[in-house]
Image (cartoon, helix red, strand yellow):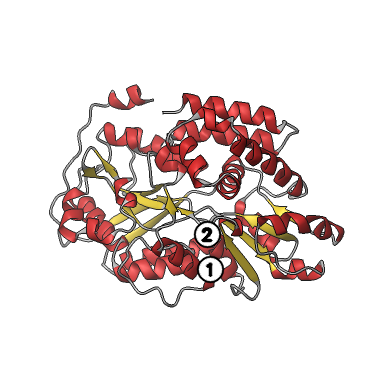
């Protein structure tokens, strides 16, 4: 694919000075659940208030569904005005081909380097010293969401960590409740695996594997315990017959499932359902075992466009996305943490306050998207999809995972 991209031989068109003319700007993203739609509406409202027009290009499904469509359009000469992607290496080849707009001048003018926290988020938007995206939130995967109603129905106290949750599984099943809600998609299963890894094996082992690409650690005792725990979690999720992540979250909201391992974006679904953190549901960062969060999330890229009006609108949107008021409004709806370290988030709920506390303590990791290429991530997700939906042994999955890490770059 890289060779194919470079064959275009295009170079980045520098952003022109802003002009007064308003423009229609198509923005593609994959935020289509109830909570996500409420959040992205805050971006659209703020952008429309500038006199420009947000043309919503929502693509149903996960990022894995949306990204190939986004890339295909850019390669095919039909670029959108702006597009969501995740922090990390997903747009690397498009940048190399000169198909993404350089935002360095705007970023330096507005002092993004002094505002973005942690700095790794802006680093993930940087390629060969130039900035190509604006980070808009911090999303972490390491959360266990627990239904108070489900545990009450089973006559149980709400567990305080993963071990207690596993120990309660049998009584949940006796009460007709699915212990672990899990959507049948590789990215969700890989997210759960990564979260279990950090809780069971710890941060050091995770870094050796994901960041340093150390296949020997995968075959060591720490990861043997991880795969055993994942195999156990697979059994707890056997009756979770839903596809999408928000459908799994709904099982928790409606007390049909005891819990779900999912990123903090699940908070948006609880909020839309009118549920209150600490009263209707509990959140356990790091599964209550190891309170450390990865710092993944979303960023917006701006495909190169020769129209000066579109260029001006792109720069206006880029500036707006990271502005204080928009950061607060969007992230409160999204359930994510803001990328700015200088804004007031005192109105955030209990779960967001937990995340803000962990971030303030510096207990953070890079996301897998920052450390692994999109191709490697896809291969791992395919493996996890097979593992979670079959009787593949923990030992066989461990060997296959080690082989993927050994080949990763």
Q: Residue at x 23, y 26 (%)?
A: 9
Q: Examine the image and state in which quarter residue 359 appears.
A: bottom left
Closer-to-camera residue (342/181): 342
CB under 8 Å between discs 2 and 1: yes
Q: Earlier in the sequence, mark 2 or mark 1?
A: 2
Crowd band around label 1 with a 10 angstrom C-alpha radius: few (<14), some (14–19), many (20+) = many
Closer-to-camera residue (212/247): 212
Q: Quadrant of the C terminus?
A: top left
Q: Residue at x 28, y 66 (%)?
A: 323
- When the figure is inspected, residue 4 is found, relative to residue 374, above or below; the finding is above
Q: Which residue is mark 2?
A: 264
Q: Quadrant of the N terminus?
A: top left
Q: Residue at x 33, y 22 (%)?
A: 3
Q: Residue at x 36, y 57 (%)?
A: 136
Question: 75 left or right of 253?
Answer: left
Closer-to-camera residue (236/6): 236
Question: 136 left or right of 290?
Answer: left
Q: Which residue is mark 1?
A: 351
The residue lying furthest to the left in this view is 17
Residue mark closest to the camera, 2 vs 1:
1
Residue 336 screen position, x and y as percent: 46, 62
Q: Secondary structure at mark 2?
A: loop
Q: CA distance from mark 2 to mark 1?
A: 9 Å
Residue 23 screen position, x and y as percent: 26, 57
Residue 261: tell me if it is visible: yes
Residue 201 screen position, x and y as percent: 57, 44
């Amino acid at each position: 694919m890289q060779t194919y991209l470079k064959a275009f031989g295009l170079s980045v068109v520098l952003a022109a000075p802003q002009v007064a003319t308003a423009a229609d700007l198509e923005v593609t993203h994959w935020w289509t659940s109830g909570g996500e739609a409420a959040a992205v509406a805050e971006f659209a409202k703020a952008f429309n208030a500038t006199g420009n027009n947000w043309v919503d290009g929502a693509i149903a499904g996960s990022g894995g569904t949306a990204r190939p469509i986004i890339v295909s359009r850019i390669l095919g000469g039909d670029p959108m005005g702006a597009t969501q992607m995740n922090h990390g290496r997903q747009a690397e080849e498009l940048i190399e081909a000169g198909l993404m707009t350089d935002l360095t001048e705007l970023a330096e003018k507005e002092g993004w380097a002094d505002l973005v926290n942690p700095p790794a988020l802006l680093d993930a938007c940087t390629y060969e010293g130039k900035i190509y995206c604006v980070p808009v939130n911090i999303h972490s995967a390491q959360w266990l969401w627990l239904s108070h109603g489900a545990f009450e129905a089973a006559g149980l106290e709400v567990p305080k960590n993963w071990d207690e949750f596993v120990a309660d599984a049998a009584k949940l099943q006796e009460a007709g409740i699915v212990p672990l809600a899990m959507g049948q998609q590789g990215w969700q299963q890989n997210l759960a695996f990564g979260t279990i890894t950090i809780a069971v094996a710890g941060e050091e082992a995770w870094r050796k594997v994901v960041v340093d690409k150390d296949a020997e650690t995968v075959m060591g005792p720490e990861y043997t315990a991880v795969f055993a725990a994942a195999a156990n979690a697979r059994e707890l999720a056997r009756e979770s017959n839903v596809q999408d992540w928000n459908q799994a979250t709904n099982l928790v909201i409606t007390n049909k499932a005891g819990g779900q391992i999912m990123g903090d974006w699940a908070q948006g679904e609880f909020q839309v359902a009118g549920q209150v953190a600490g009263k209707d549901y509990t959140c356990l960062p790091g599964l209550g075992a190891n309170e450390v969060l990865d710092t993944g999330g979303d960023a917006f890229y701006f495909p190169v466009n020769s129209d000066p009006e579109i260029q001006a609108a792109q720069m206006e949107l880029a500036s707006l996305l990271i502005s204080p008021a928009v950061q607060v409004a969007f992230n409160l709806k999204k359930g994510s943490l803001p990328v700015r370290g200088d804004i007031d988030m005192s109105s955030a709920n209990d779960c967001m306050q937990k995340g803000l506390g962990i971030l303030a303590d510096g207990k953070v990791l890079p996301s897998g998207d920052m450390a692994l290429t999109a191709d490697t991530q896809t291969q791992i997700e395919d493996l996890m999809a097979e593992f979670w939906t079959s009787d593949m042994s923990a030992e066989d999955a461990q060997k296959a995972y080690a082989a993927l890490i050994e080949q990763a770059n």
